[in-house]
Image: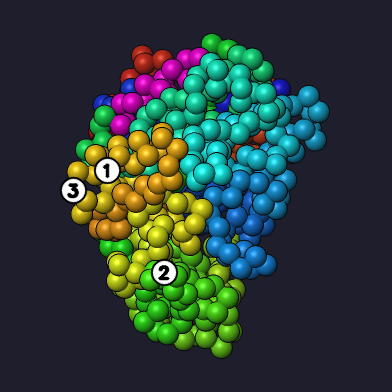
Amino acid sequence: MQRTVVLNVVGLTRALLGEHTPNINRLAGHSTTIKPVTPAVTCAAQATYLTGKQPSEHGIVANGWYFRDQNEVWLWRQSNKLIQAPKIWDIARARDASFTCSNTFWWYAMATDADYTLTPRPLYLADGRKLPDCYTYPLELRETITEKLGTFPLFHFWGPATSIKSSRWIADAAMHVETEHSPTLQLVYLPHLDYCLQKFGPDGDIGKDLQEIDDLVGELIDFFTERDCQVILLSEYGIGPVNRPVHPNRILREAGKLSLKVDLGREYLDFHTCRAFAMSDHQIAHIYIQAPEDIDEIKALFSNTPGVAKVLAGAERAEYGLDHERAGELILLAEPDSWFTYYYWQDDTRAPDYANQVEIHKKPGFDPCEMFLNPKLKLPKLRIVRKLLQKKLGFRYVLDVISTDPSQLKGSHGVWDGSDYTTPVLMSSNPDLLPGHQVQATDVCDIILQHIFAEPQNKTTPTQTENSDSEQETPDA
């Protein structure tokens, strides 16, 4: 077996390569592109890469869904048992029992039979505090790695303070795992570009962010190459420019399909008594409908909604690999310039208490506005300092500083439009194992396995000189 590392550089596309990415350009001459899965979002993309299956087979239909038996919408669950297909480590072990794998921050990393795993896992204390932390397997790895690297910087991983610090910590953790355990395959998640591309768009001022992730990737390429590992660099999706938020739940509310429970003057969705509601996730929305007789009416409603490109019903979902019991009765796909919010309230004073907070487990849909501070607040950073002081003193506090202005978002993903903006990349230090054409997302699992089980070849050690021609052909960011 040939030891291999997969660097998942979130949001990377050929449109971003150029003067700010000299290290990534070293692999750019040995690359192809990937037609992403639908939806092109984190959990669905990763599950497809790790199983070689569509969401209709592995069951990950978005970053979350309506759990019908629990009557709850949950995003960002962490159990690997939610993936309903054999994973790459199962397939590889069946071929060679000595195979080992480390999952370093790819999602669904708990309750897994990967040999090593690291994933975000805050501590939720009885007094209401949330403290940064991570989960590892083996359990003692958490203590060892925290002692060496410090606590995982959770608040730099998601929220208004996102920065290179989280990707830096993950990269250092990956190198620690390699040094101490040398797994056959290591999967490394580097999220840094996900933040700036959504906040500013792919044409925004993101040169500094590109340079930061490029420096980190260059360090990892050199480190793993020196340790005789093949390097695969890929992305899950590309992020295109958007300027039009669409609010499916507000549309359903106006059509009389939502049911709202009012607590202390604030509105909350009551899923079971809704005739229909939307679970929005970037550029896809699952519409869950209680009464089959409502499907045609609701399909017609959204078919005439600006910003909605397609409304999939019944067998139409199979064309996109989304015919699964977890999927909505209808699935909305956004136009390239649009994305879907989870918002359902019509009066901000009646918004749920979590609306202005980073609450990824309470919101009934993905909320990219969690990356923005509320522009209506005066001195928001002073407000944060005061809240954190309350936290340090042991008082309960609510960090309600997040924006609910969807116009701030400049980039989104989930639906592939064929452009360079939205097309993920696949690069390798062993170019003989990459096809000379675009691959399907379902092909990635086999391509990784081919790297591991191929006969030893002369791996290319990427150098600046060797790829100078390909760099000249690469567009500037």
Which residue is label 1 attached to? 383
Q: In the depicted view, which residue is nearer to us: 328 or 473?
A: 328
Going from the N terminus, do you reach mark 1 or mark 3 first? Answer: 3
Going from the N terminus, do you reach mark 2 or mark 1 first? Answer: 2
Q: Is 245 displayed left or right of 75 in the figure? A: left
SS class, disc 1: helix
Q: Is 348 displayed left or right of 361 in the figure? A: left
- In the picture, the disc for residue 17 is none
| Residue 278 position in % (x across, y down) | 47, 69
The part of the image, by quadrant, that contains residue 119 is top right
Separation (CA) of disc 2 from disc 1: 24 Å
Q: Which residues are magenta?
A: 209-224
Residue 421 visible in the current orientation: no
Check the image and report above or below for 435 versus 336.
above
Label 1 crowd bin: few (<14), some (14–19), many (20+), radius 10 Å: some
| Residue 16 position in % (x across, y down) | 32, 37
